[in-house]
Image: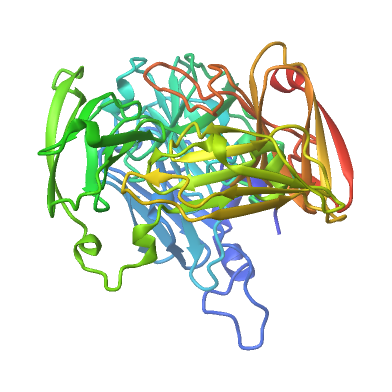
Amino acid sequence: MMNFKNLIPAIPFVLILGASFFSHSCANTKGTPEGGPKDTIPPILVAVNPLPEGKNVPLKLAAAFTFNEYVTVKDQKAITISPPLDKPVKAKLRGRSVVITSESDLLPNTTYTIDVTGAINDNNENNPFPGYTLVFSTGEVIDSMYITGLVQDCSTLKPMKGATVMLYKDHSDSALFKHRPNAVAKTDEWGFFCIRNIQDTLYRIYAIDDKNNNNIYEPQTEGIAFVDSLIRPVNVVTEGRYELYKFDMKDTLSCSKRKTEYELNMFMGENVKQDINNHGRIGERTAYISFLAKNAIVDSVWFRGISPKRVVKQMLGERDSMLVWINSRKVQPDTLYMNVKFMKTDSTGKLAPATQEFKLAKPRKSIAQKSPQDKKDTVAQLKTSGPGETFEQYGIELAFEYPLVKGSLDSLKYEVINPRQKKEPGSYTWKTDSLDMRKFHIMHKGKVQPGYEYILTVPHRMFMDINGYYNDSTIVKVKLPDDDKLSTLNLVISGTASKRYIVDMLTDKRDKVLRSYVIEEDQTLAFPYLKEGKYSIRITEDANRNGKVDIGDLMERRQPEKVKFYKLSEENTVLEIPASSEISQDINLIEMFK
């Protein structure tokens, strides 16, 4: 059989004229005979209308794709027409054909492409049709330029499948919000896209996570990526270009040969309109407020009939939410009236002072009487954490459920037991968590030694929370792991050049940060006590020196901070750590980020 993937850019007439040959030799449309081999051959395209690169096509869309067997439309949303129409296209089955229509007329003197990749399967075994792009024009000219690129998540660099890449001839910042683009394409499983048969002119290029498939960016729910400057296509659609073929996504060799011109890093855009998004009462003395946008500016929060001095508040996350507590032991009314004075976006789009009052009903659990009273309801709740694997870097964490109004972290009992079981007083320092005033980190002062045990005791009634409840006595014991199967990874970092970087160890799937360092100078970073397994190293150029990986800003034309994953080879970003080993890797940041 002929290699169909090499015939994708334009259907040869021999394929169309040979329909009867293909329909008899490549598929059985009536099902597999009992006991026979399973049909694994995908449907074959034998005819299209209008013809490939047809000209003066009528403005009423009626494109037919005919196959050698009966097929089904697996995913209508996968059908992409470029330029997009005001009304969505519809696909209907007529015999062995898929007919694509739309209520919107085509534009005159315009080159169109219809891509059905990922939309069609055969009717018997669900074998997917590999894909095809039909090109035609409603005028005398077929546009012949194309561009390619890659869309990936800005923080994990994972490819974004199914993203919509859009070109605009309108170069204004508002174009993305006002009207549909002049050309579009969808990314495949590799995050790869090719927008083909476009005009030779200047464009703005964007990619969005188009959840409702309307080709319009909706910042509340959709991710966005963009290229800073205007772009102009330089490549011409011709035979033999790998970028124009439709490959099996498992064909790593062929897919990796496709050249990409642009790299777009997608992030969730930030809401520029500020207002209170949600609010509620989650306990006897606890409420919350969430805002539409981050960095909310809150002047004050108070309750009717309660002294403002009794109100404790804490911003959370990226200052887009707030917890509020009433520092009083009194039983609170069934209904509280909370007032919030903050900076709100007005009708002109500018921030202006506003005050809103909210009626907060007591949660049912708080109203119900408990008999007998639970111990949890009379004790300051404290959670502790101090795994040996991260003790050297993060220490012991104390996390209280409510803010504290009394107590001293300088008066904890801290002891060290050496391998001979001799107990001595230990020295420690402490710091408040940067994101939560209810959390504290107790750090060992000095070098942590293997074979030693470190014991922290929080004495009874050392702390009192805003409810007037005292803590129970708590003991935390920590010992460095002594499993001889654990391993150590040392990263020898050079080329910092007075810049700040964030170095994260992640799982190989890049879905969880295991360890993190912020560095400003060349040094060796140790990642000890690692279990045998696969890991990834992510390094972020911390341009604004705030110690976190920042996303971009579309309106300010600011890209996400540069992220790279350490590679052992051109495509391998996974470090396989064997058991009982110590491994060193040299990383030159100048080379990595050049």
Number of residue marks:
0
Residue 545, quarter of the rendered image: top right
Who's the residue at 78% across and 34% down the image?
Answer: 447
Colouring convention used in this rendered image of the protein: rainbow
Q: Is residue 468 above or below residue 545?
A: below
Closest to the observer: 528 or 152? 528
Residue 1 visible to the viewer: yes
Q: Quadrant of the C terminus?
A: top right
Who's the residue at 44% across and 45% down the image?
Answer: 463
Q: Position of residue 159 (x, y in %)?
A: 58, 41
Instruction: Locate residue 419 relative to residue 69 in the image: left or right.
Output: right
Who's the residue at 76% across and 16% down the image?
Answer: 495
Residue extending farthest to the top is 498
Residue extending farthest to the bottom is 34
Closest to the observer: 363 or 5? 363
Closest to the observer: 448 or 40? 448
Q: Position of residue 321 (x, y in %)?
A: 33, 37
Residue 445, quarter of the rendered image: top right
Q: Position of residue 306 (x, y in %)?
A: 15, 38
Closest to the observer: 341 or 311? 311
Q: Position of residue 88 (x, y in %)?
A: 29, 45
Residue 254 visible to the viewer: no
Instruction: Locate residue 497 relative to residue 311 in the image: left or right.
Output: right
Q: Is residue 389 above or below residue 291?
A: below
Q: Quadrant of the N terminus?
A: bottom right
